[in-house]
Amino acid sequence: MTREFSAGGIVFKKLKAGSAKREDLLWLICQHSQHKGWVFPKGLIGDNIKGEKSENTAVREVREETGIEGKIIAKLPNPATYWYVWQGEKRFKTVSYFLMEYISGDIKNHDFEMSEVIWLPTDKVMERLTYKSDKLAFGEALKLMDKLPS
């Protein structure tokens, strides 16, 4: 069994300047090109940059996979964990997610790893996400958002 450590971003964009109310937010999600699941952008820590910190990985992966620049607001308190099989080998993955706010960029500029990148309103995200680990992470992101000044 191999262990993997990844980092990613749960990125929001405000529809109304200054408002962090759930109904005034859009969330960035993507459809993976290989497994076709709807997920949050993430990638392996230090796969290309030796000694890279999880925060830097998260920002970089969001930019590469979605075309969006995000600013970290907070780290989610609990990492997402799950098992998967790659080339016949069982792997255990731990993902540190960061709540991020949209700064700039265009989702049309996403890379090949994602077949589609979209913004969704808060009430549509859970039904679009494919995996339980992403749904749990989104629930944590919403709890963090509720603590921010609106």
Image (cartoon, rainbow, N blue to C red):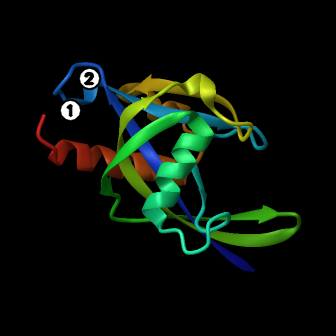
Task: Determine the residue positioned at 88% across, 64% down.
Answer: 87
Residue at mark 1 to residue at mark 2: CA–CA distance: 7 Å
The percent coordinates of residue 107 (x first, y second) are 55, 26
| The quarter of the displayed image where residue 117 is located | top right
CB contact under 8 Å: marks 1 and 2: yes
Viewport quadrant of the C terminus: top left
The percent coordinates of residue 111 (x first, y second) are 68, 36
Task: Determine the residue positioned at 47% across, 25% down.
Answer: 119
Circle number at residue 24: 2
Q: Residue furthest left?
A: 149
The percent coordinates of residue 83 (x first, y second) are 66, 66
Viewport quadrant of the N terminus: bottom right
- Between 1 and 15, the one nearer to me in the picture: 15
Residue highlighted by disc 1:
20
Task: Determine the residue positioned at 54% across, 41% down.
Answer: 63
Query: Image height check: is 97 above or below 139?
Result: below
Query: Image height check: is 86 above or below 72?
Result: below
